[in-house]
Image: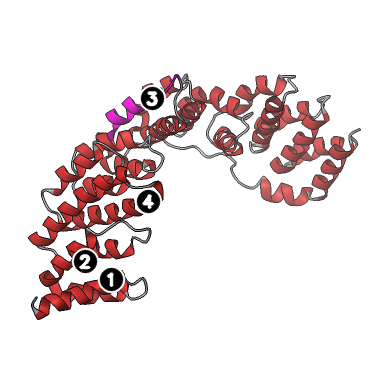
């Protein structure tokens, strides 16, 4: 073995040290092509729970560049992908990280063989690193892979970024994904429903009002998550489409998932024209079940976020409701809304027969001047113009 080859092996061996490895990287890079065989050997070594040394080897090959580095990385890409099914679960994450580094290194080298090699992996599995690397070549196959990977919990975020990168080119694949639930043993898995919900969100972002038809169709979907995502996407596209989405948004107010309910509440308050109209049936429902109670409270909270002239009369009527829970929610909404009409309604509630309602109303009145000057000083609703990328 030549002296230069021994120097290369010694330098690459330092990459195995968690402490010294990152510092040794520049010494390896300075050796150039002489270090490629040692780097290739390290990269093809066994899978270990600590993946830093092999990831540094991939980065070193990319930094050195040249045909020999590209050949080593392509060989390592196939080897790493093939290991996945043979590894115990505890090591799969580490190997997935190595595969990401190899894919990124190939993308940096811009080797013309890389897209086919990356696609061969993505045909069989969703892998975020391979998907991102393929998209960096602007390869059209990335759109189809990304649309499929929306349903993969581990790769869905990267898939969404790739579809955004391709813009309107992604719309047909997203439309197909949204309309096609994947049924397993008679039911749709949560990851599939989540992927279709993400497809609805992306359609609204990328296609604008041209996405109206598939999004409206999704309002009748079996999955609550898909219906909500379609409703929110429509609500962001303009007042007329927000009105079409409003009934589904109102239904979600009773959801036991507070995040989903908050998203619906926020959209109703900010984007839907005259939401008190669609909320009227929910507010009039005498149901005493938990979902109905949650829905009424959140509907009243929506009213508290509207302009006094729009929601004040409705809240004043609700202040006479026989249910003390409703009246308590009304006091909170009135305090949030502010204005002289709200103050007058709170003054009546300050003598309410229910102790909690009475205390809440009196506390709100104690801050009434500040509420009038601060909360009534600016617009409460925001109109979102139709968007299209």
For label 4, the residue is 93
Q: How far is the residue under mark 1 from the one under mark 2?
A: 10 Å
Estimate how packed mark 2 is, as few (under 14), some (14 to 19) or many (20 or more) residues with alpha carbons within 10 Å: many
CB-based contact (under 8 Å), mark 4 and mark 2: no
* Residue 309 at least partly seen: no
Which quadrant of the figure has residue 282?
A: top right
Residue 156: x %, y % from top left: 38, 40
* Residue 41 at least partly seen: yes
For label 3, the residue is 182
**Closer to us: mark 1 or mark 2?**
1
Q: How far is the residue under mark 4 from the one under mark 2?
A: 21 Å
Nearer-N-terminus badge (2/3): 2
Name the quadrant of the N terminus. bottom left
Q: Give the side of residue 389 with respect to residue 309, left or right.
A: left
The range drawn in magenta is 170-186
Identify the element where label 2 is drawn: helix
Q: How far is the residue under mark 3 from the one under mark 4?
A: 26 Å
Q: Give the side of residue 352 with respect to residue 83, left or right.
A: right
Residue 110: x %, y % from top left: 14, 54
Q: Which mark is residue 31?
A: none
For label 1, the residue is 15
Estimate how packed mark 3 is, as few (under 14), some (14 to 19) or many (20 or more) residues with alpha carbons within 10 Å: some
Q: How far is the residue under mark 1 from the one under mark 3?
A: 45 Å
Nearer-N-terminus badge (1/2): 1
Q: Is residue 192 above or below residue 305?
A: above
Identify the element where label 1 is drawn: helix
């Amino acid at each position: 073995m030549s002296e230069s080859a021994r120097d290369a092996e010694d330098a690459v061996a330092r990459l195995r040290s968690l402490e010294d490895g990152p510092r040794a990287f520049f010494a390896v890079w300075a050796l150039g092509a002489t270090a490629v065989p040692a780097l290739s050997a390290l990269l093809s070594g066994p899978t270990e729970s600590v993946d830093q040394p092999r990831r540094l080897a991939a980065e070193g090959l990319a930094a050195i560049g040249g045909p020999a580095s590209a050949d080593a990385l392509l060989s390592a890409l196939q080897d790493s992908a093939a290991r996945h099914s043979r590894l115990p679960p505890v090591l799969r994450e580490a190997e997935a990280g190595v595969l990401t580094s190899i894919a990124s290194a190939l993308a940096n080298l811009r080797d013309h063989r890389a897209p086919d090699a990356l696609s061969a992996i993505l045909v069989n599995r969703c892998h975020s690193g391979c998907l991102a690397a393929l998209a960096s070549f602007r390869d059209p196959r990335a759109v189809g892979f990304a649309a499929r990977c929306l349903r993969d919990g581990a790769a869905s975020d990267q898939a969404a970024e790739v579809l955004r990168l391709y813009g309107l080119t992604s719309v047909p694949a997203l439309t197909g994904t949204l309309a096609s639930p994947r049924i397993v043993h008679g039911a749709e898995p949560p990851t599939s429903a989540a992927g279709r919900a993400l497809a609805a969100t992306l359609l609204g972002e990328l296609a604008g009002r041209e996405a109206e038809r598939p999004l409206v169709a999704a309002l009748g979907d079996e999955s609550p998550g898909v219906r909500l995502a379609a409703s929110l996407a429509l609500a962001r596209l303009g007042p007329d489409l927000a009105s079409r989405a409003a009934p589904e948004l109102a239904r979600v107010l009773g959801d036991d998932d507070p995040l989903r309910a908050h998203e619906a509440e926020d959209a109703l308050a900010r984007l839907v024209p005259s939401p008190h109209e669609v909320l009227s049936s929910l507010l009039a429902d005498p149901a005493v079940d938990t979902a109905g109670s949650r829905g009424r409270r959140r509907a009243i909270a929506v009213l508290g976020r509207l302009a006094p002239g729009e929601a004040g009369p409705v809240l004043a009527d609700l202040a006479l409701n026989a249910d003390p829970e409703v009246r308590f929610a009304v006091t909170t909404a009135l305090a949030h809304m502010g204005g002289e009409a709200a103050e007058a309604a709170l003054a009546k509630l300050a003598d309410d027969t229910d102790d909690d309602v009475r205390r809440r109303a009196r506390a709100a009145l104690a801050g009434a001047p500040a509420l009038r000057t601060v909360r009534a000083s600016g617009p409460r609703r925001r109109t979102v113009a139709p968007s299209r990328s």
